[in-house]
C-alpha cells in the first residue's frame, strides 16, 4: 500500500486524470538544460534490460536507483555508489523530485504505467521499455500525457538505429516494390504457456513481493513468475507480441507510416485465461491515407504459412512486404528483393535517413530541447497499442472495429473488457 501522504497525492492526481486535466507543461523542474549539461537521471528497474539501459545512460548523472530485488540490483549499486537507493519509486519522487530531469524505466510490463505516469505528471522526461505499457488504455494515456506536457520520450525499440532495418524502410518508401497493400510480420517463437506454480513458495528475502505485484491482483509468490517468465502470464506480461513486436513492427510502421488500425482480428489455439499462447495469427487493417494505399498488416507468433507457400526461407528475417511490383523479405540486418531475377541489378538503398547519434543519445538530446527521439511516444505509442490490440483480438478469437478516437472496440463486449485492465486497491487511477 502507498504511504499516507503519497496515497493522498496519488488520489488527487488520479482525479485530475479522470477529469481530463493535466498539471502544466513544464518539461523539467530545473531550468532549461544546456546542450552539454549532464541529465540528472533516476533509473527504475535494474535487472536484465534495466542493467543494459543503466550501462547506456551511465555517463549521465545517475542520482537515484530503484529496484525491489536487492540481489538482481546489486551490480548496479556497486557501479553507481553515489546514487541514492530506493525500493519504492513513489518514495524516490517524494524525496528527489526537484533534482530529477528524466527517468529510465525497465520494469516488468505490468509495472510500466505507474512509475511512468508518476514521473510524467511531475514533468519528467521518460525512457520506457517496450511494449510501453500493459494495456491499450495505459499506452494511450501515456502517449497523450507526453504530448500534453511536451515531454521528451523514447520507447526501447533500440533496433530502430540499425542500418539493415533502415535499408528495408528506405526500399519501401522509395517504391522499390510498388504499392504495398499487405505485410506479414512474425516472431519465430513458441514460447508461452509456462508451467503453473506447484505448492507454497516463500519469496526470496531480497525481493519485495508486494511491490513486485504492484497494481496486479494479489497472488502468492512463485519462481514460475520471476525473474523472467512473468512475460508469459497475462496479469504481468503481454507475451511474445509485447516482447518482440515493437522491434519487428517498427519496420512496417516506419516504412508505411502506420498509426492506428480501424479493424483487428485474431485466431489461434484456444486462449488460456492466465497464460499467453505459443502461437497466434492476427491482422490489423489500416485505412488509406494521402501517403499510401490501405494496408493489411498480419502479426504472427510463429512463421506464417505464406512464407512456405511462396517458397521462401526466412533465415532470421521477420517481415514480408507484398507490393504491386514485387516483394521484400527483410529483418534487422538484411533484406531480399523478390523475385531475385527482377531485382538482381536494383541499386542499393541510399542515405534517406540521417545517421542516429545513438538510440539513448537521441533521447538525451531531446531532453535538452533538441529534436524528438525517433521512437518518441507520438510514433511508438500507436505501434505498441496496435500490438496489444492484436493480443486482444487473439484472446477474444474474433474481429472488432477499433474507434481510435474513443479508445473503444466496436462490436465486441469481450474485447472492451480487455482494453483497460483493473488495478488492485491502492493503485487505482
Image (cartoon, grey):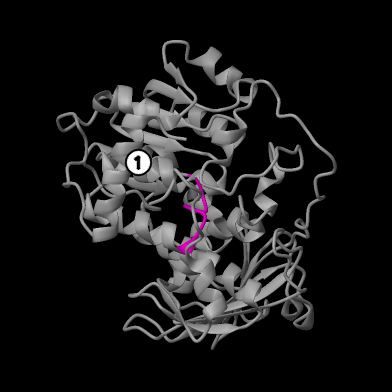
| Image point (28%, 28%), residue name | 97
Residue range in magenta is: 129-136
Give the vertical position of 6 relative to 264 (above or below): above
Residue 349, x across and y down, in percent? 49, 64
| Image point (48%, 61%), residue name | 384
207 or 338: nearer the eye? 207
Residue 409, x across and y down, in percent? 46, 79
- Dominant SS type (magenta): loop
Residue 394 at least partly seen: yes
Q: How many marks?
A: 1
Residue 348 at least partly seen: no
Left-right relation of 61 to 412: left
Left-right relation of 398 to 222: left
Residue 227, x across and y down, in percent? 68, 36
Give the vertical position of 169 relative to 429 (above or below): below
Give the vertical position of 330 relative to 76 (above or below): below
- Asked if the magenta segment contains residue 429, the reply would be no
Left-right relation of 63 to 252: left
Q: Residue furthest right?
A: 198
Residue 246, x across and y down, in percent? 53, 57
Can you identify the residue that label 1 sits on? 118
| Image point (49%, 67%), residue name | 419
167 or 223: nearer the eye? 223
| Image point (31%, 50%), residue name | 14
Task: Say which quarter of the image contains residue 220.
Answer: top right
Disc 1, SS: helix
Task: Tell me if mark 1 has few (under 14), some (14-19) or many (20+) residues whose alpha carbon lies within 10 angstroms of its own.
Answer: some
Amino acid at each position: 500500500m502507498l504511504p499516507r501522504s503519497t496515497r493522498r497525492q496519488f488520489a488527487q492526481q488520479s482525479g485530475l486524470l479522470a477529469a481530463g486535466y493535466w498539471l502544466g507543461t513544464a518539461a523539467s523542474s530545473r531550468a532549461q538544460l544546456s546542450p552539454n549539461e549532464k541529465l540528472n537521471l533516476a533509473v527504475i528497474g535494474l535487472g536484465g534490460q534495466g542493467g543494459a539501459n543503466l550501462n547506456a545512460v551511465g555517463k549521465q548523472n545517475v542520482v537515484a536507483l530503484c529496484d525491489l530485488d536487492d540481489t538482481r540490483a546489486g551490480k548496479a549499486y556497486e557501479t553507481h555508489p553515489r546514487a541514492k537507493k530506493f525500493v519504492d519509486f513513489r518514495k524516490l519522487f517524494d524525496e528527489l523530485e526537484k533534482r530529477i530531469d528524466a527517468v529510465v524505466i525497465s520494469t516488468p510490463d505490468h509495472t510500466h504505467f505507474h512509475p511512468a505516469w508518476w514521473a510524467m505528471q511531475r514533468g519528467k522526461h521518460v525512457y520506457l521499455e517496450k511494449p510501453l505499457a500493459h494495456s491499450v488504455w495505459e499506452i494511450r494515456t501515456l502517449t497523450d500525457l507526453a504530448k500534453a506536457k511536451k515531454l521528451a520520450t523514447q520507447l526501447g525499440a533500440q533496433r530502430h538505429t540499425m542500418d539493415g532495418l533502415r535499408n528495408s524502410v528506405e526500399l519501401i518508401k522509395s517504391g522499390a516494390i510498388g504499392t504495398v497493400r499487405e505485410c506479414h510480420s512474425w516472431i519465430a517463437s513458441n514460447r508461452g504457456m509456462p508451467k503453473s506454480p506447484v505448492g507454497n513458495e516463500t519469496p526470496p528475502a531480497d525481493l519485495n513481493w508486494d511491490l513486485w505485484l504492484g497494481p496486479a491482483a494479489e497472488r502468492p509468490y512463485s519462481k514460475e513468475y520471476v525473474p523472467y517468465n512473468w512475460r508469459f502470464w497475462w496479469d504481468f506480461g503481454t507475451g511474445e507480441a509485447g516482447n518482440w513486436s515493437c522491434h519487428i513492427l517498427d519496420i512496417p510502421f516506419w516504412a508505411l507510416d502506420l498509426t492506428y488500425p480501424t479493424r483487428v482480428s485474431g485466431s489461434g489455439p484456444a486462449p488460456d485465461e492466465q497464460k499467453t499462447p505459443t502461437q497466434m495469427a492476427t491482422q490489423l487493417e489500416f485505412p488509406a491515407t494521402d501517403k499510401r494505399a490501405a494496408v493489411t498488416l498480419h502479426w504472427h507468433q510463429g512463421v506464417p504459412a505464406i512464407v512456405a507457400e511462396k517458397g521462401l526461407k526466412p533465415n532470421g528475417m521477420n517481415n514480408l512486404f507484398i507490393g504491386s511490383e514485387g516483394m521484400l523479405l527483410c529483418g534487422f540486418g538484411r533484406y531480399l528483393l523478390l523475385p531475385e531475377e527482377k531485382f538482381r541489378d536494383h541499386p542499393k538503398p541510399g542515405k534517406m535517413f540521417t545517421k542516429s547519434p545513438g538510440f539513448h543519445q537521441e533521447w538525451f538530446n531531446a531532453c535538452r530541447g533538441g529534436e524528438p527521439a525517433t521512437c518518441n511516444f507520438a510514433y511508438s505509442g500507436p505501434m505498441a497499442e496496435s500490438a496489444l490490440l492484436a493480443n486482444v483480438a487473439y484472446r477474444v478469437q474474433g474481429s472488432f472495429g477499433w474507434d481510435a478516437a474513443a479508445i473503444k472496440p466496436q462490436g465486441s463486449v469481450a474485447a472492451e473488457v480487455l482494453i483497460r485492465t483493473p488495478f488492485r486497491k491502492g493503485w487505482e487511477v
